Image (cartoon, rainbow, N blue to C red):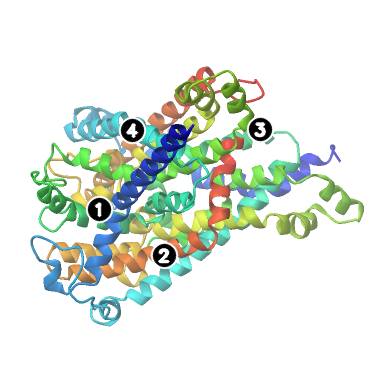
């Protein structure tokens, strides 16, 4: 009996040891970038490298805003703007479309549903050349419209997520409101949307992380530095570091700053995040 | 209510239909058209039939890019699926602090792509990176992670393991939905843990294996940012993946017609892969409730 307990306890300790070791591996890349962001320029050039600076240079996080000769604030404001428009567009359009698919039957429903679902597997890269040509003619190149119009017309994966969620809301709510004389538009906005809060939170977080971190689309469409999003700006700073015109400690600091918003969003609503991610996969 | 249902259906889904036609279908059709032209974006397009496709077959760079992508698909996809599953199984128990570990392993997937690339580049740097430093301290030889054509894809596969949390959370949710009764019944029958894993756990999580397979494969087909930020597709084209090749031909060399032809083939590869996964899933994905 005792040996059985002992065996169980050893197993537990070994598991913890393994998990801690793995956690160290996962945290290591962050540790070096944070360490670098607090070094002096010369400390970043040391060989062999050290993880931590002698004295943490917190002023690096002030210097990046005014000593680098780049419009960092502007880039962040641009990204805040494009990201919020994308997130709003996705939430409004996807919940609206999903309500239609979840509640009504009609000719062509299955066709359109499958057609839209299939687009989940069409990578942006397969459409980028024609989209670029078309947007060029519409005057969308070097314009935020290139990023923020499409999300207002639905996005398969988020639409699916909303649909799955709406299917779990009993129809009785709709019907009760209908008897009270409400139209479907009002039922949607005043009965369904308030109950969608957890799904809205999940989609908001997922869409935020994707839009904030997106690189390819803004890189293709935004040309003048004043219009850059933070990811293009970060890539730009990186290229100047590689070519020796900028400093590695500042690059590290901007990298940290760029990563923080997604982490804050994640930690502030972690429970919705996991739930939202999985509603589609598990309930299939 | 049923009679008027069609009207209400379209009242709500029209933005989706419009989005599908304008932002998905139209570009795909237009890509087909452009792929038949020689077009640099400035002078009028010139019809050349299938020449872009013929050139593609003769373009060694194209085959290398396709090969690089398939290499990642063959090695990275199964590795990611297995590691994510192992981690999920390990983390699927009620222990103190387990939530903290789940969070730590998940965080890398939240990073902006460029930030993640820079973090990785810093860690794997020859002289300034801590990974090589750790190898030296352990008495091993430093490795040229990013600029040796034989190593760079291996490095990117390693890096891919860093964001294995994406698949892990899907598995975890699935695992937590498995009714404990199955395991209790197996315990009564005296089943070993290994048997329980292969006979109960594995069949019941096949839906999320399928889901992760498709999601991870689309990620691999769209591998772009590390090549663009870290290696510029090099060394010797070893990290030029499909979409990086497409991008450089289209936007750097202004061969919009040629890049469109590559996009058309990419489109077919994606459709083929997705259909293949779906079709094959009928024989190996198990849905509770019996319908397969």
Query: Which mark is nearer the camera, 2 or 3?
Result: 3
Chain identity of mark 2: A
Spatial CA span between label 1 and label 3: 44 Å
Picture coordinates of residue A117 (x, y %)?
Answer: 56, 38
* Residue at 25%, 53% in the rendered image: B120
The kind of secondary structure element at disc 4 is helix
Q: Nearer the viewer, mark 4 or mark 2?
A: 4
Distance from the alpha carbon under mark 1 to that under mark 2: 31 Å
Disc 2 secondary structure class:
loop
Which secondary structure, mark 3?
helix
The tag on residue B159 is none
Asked if labels 1 and 2 share a chain, the reply is: no
Give yes or no for contact between labels 1 and 2 (Cβ–Cβ under 8 Å).
Answer: no
Q: Which residue is mark 1?
A: B120
Q: Is residue A68 visible?
A: yes
Q: Position of residue B211 (x, y in %)?
A: 49, 34
| Tag 3 subunit | A
Instruction: Count neighbours of disc 4 (C-alpha within 10 A) and say few if under 14, some if 14 to 19, many if 20 or more.
Output: some
Q: Chain of mark 4?
A: B
Task: Classify mark 1: helix, strand or loop.
Answer: helix
| Cα–Cα gap, marks 4 and 3 | 36 Å
What residue is shown with label 3?
A: A110
Disc 2 crowd rating (10 Å Cα; few below 14, some 14-19, many 20+) is: some
Q: Residues within 10 Å of mark 3 (few under 14, many from 20)?
A: few
Q: Label 2: which residue?
A: A143
- Is residue A269 rendered to the left or right of residue A189? left
Camera-nearest label, 1 or 3: 1
Q: Is residue B30 visible?
A: no
Q: Are marks 2 and 3 in contact (CB under 8 Å)?
A: no
Give the x, y percent position of residue B212.
Answer: 46, 35
Residue holding disc 4: B79
Q: CA distance from mark 4 to mark 2?
A: 40 Å
């Amino acid at each position: 009996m005792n040996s059985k307990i002992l065996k169980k306890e050893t197993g537990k300790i070994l598991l913890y040891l393994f998990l801690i070791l793995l956690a160290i591996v996962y945290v290591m890349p962050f540790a070096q970038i944070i360490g670098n962001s607090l070094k002096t320029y010369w400390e970043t050039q040391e060989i062999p490298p050290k993880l931590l600076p002698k004295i943490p240079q917190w002023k690096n996080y002030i210097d990046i805003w005014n000593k680098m000769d780049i419009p960092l604030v502007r880039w962040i404001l641009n990204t805040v703007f494009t990201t919020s428009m994308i997130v709003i567009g996705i939430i409004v359009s996807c919940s609206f479309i999903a309500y239609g698919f979840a509640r009504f039957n009609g000719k062509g429903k299955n066709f359109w549903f499958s057609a839209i679902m299939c687009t989940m597997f069409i990578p942006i890269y397969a459409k980028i050349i024609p989209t670029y040509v078309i947007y060029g003619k519409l005057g969308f190149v070097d314009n935020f419209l290139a990023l923020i119009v499409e999300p207002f017309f639905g996005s398969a994966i988020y639409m699916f997520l909303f649909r799955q969620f709406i299917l779990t809301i009993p129809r009785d709510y709709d019907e009760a409101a209908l008897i009270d004389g409400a139209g479907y538009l009002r039922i949607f906005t005043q009965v369904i949307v308030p109950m969608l809060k957890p799904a809205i939170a999940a989609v908001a977080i997922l869409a935020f992380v994707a839009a904030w971190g997106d690189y390819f689309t803004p890189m293709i469409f935004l040309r003048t530095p004043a219009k850059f999003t933070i990811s293009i700006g970060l890539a730009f700073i990186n290229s100047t570091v590689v070519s020796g015109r900028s400093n590695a400690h500042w690059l590290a600091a901007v990298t940290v700053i760029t990563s923080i918003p997604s982490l804050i969003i994640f930690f502030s609503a972690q429970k919705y995040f996991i739930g939202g991610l999985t509603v589609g996969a598990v309930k299939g | 209510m049923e009679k008027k249902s069609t009207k209400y259906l379209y009242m709500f889904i029209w933005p989706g239909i419009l989005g599908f036609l304008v932002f998905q279908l139209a570009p795909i059709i237009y890509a087909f058209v452009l792929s038949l032209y020689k077009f640099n974006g400035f002078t009028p397009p010139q019809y050349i039939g299938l020449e872009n496709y013929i050139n593609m077959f003769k373009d060694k760079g194209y085959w290398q890019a396709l090969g690089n992508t398939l290499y990642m698909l063959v090695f990275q996809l199964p590795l990611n699926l297995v590691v994510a599953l192992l981690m999920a199984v390990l983390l699927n128990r009620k222990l103190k602090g387990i939530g903290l570990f789940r969070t730590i392993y998940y965080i890398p997937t939240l990073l902006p792509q460029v930030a993640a690339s820079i973090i990785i580049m810093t860690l794997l740097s020859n002289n300034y990176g801590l990974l090589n430093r750790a190898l030296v301290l352990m008495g091993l030889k430093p490795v040229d992670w990013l600029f040796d054509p034989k190593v760079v894809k291996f490095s990117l596969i390693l890096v891919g393991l860093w964001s294995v949390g994406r698949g892990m959370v899907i598995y975890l949710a699935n695992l937590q939905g498995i009714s404990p009764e199955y395991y209790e019944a197996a315990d009564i029958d005296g089943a070993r843990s290994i048997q329980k894993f292969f006979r109960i756990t594995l069949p019941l999580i096949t839906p999320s294996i399928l889901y992760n397979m498709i999601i991870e494969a689309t990620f691999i087909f769209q591998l772009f940012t590390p090549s663009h930020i870290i290696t510029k597709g090099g060394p010797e084209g070893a990290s030029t993946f499909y979409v990086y090749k497409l991008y450089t031909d289209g936007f750097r060399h202004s061969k919009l017609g040629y890049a469109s032809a590559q996009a058309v083939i990419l489109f077919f590869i994606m459709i083929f892969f997705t259909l293949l996964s779906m079709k094959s899933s009928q024989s190996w994905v198990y849905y509770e409730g019996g319908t397969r």
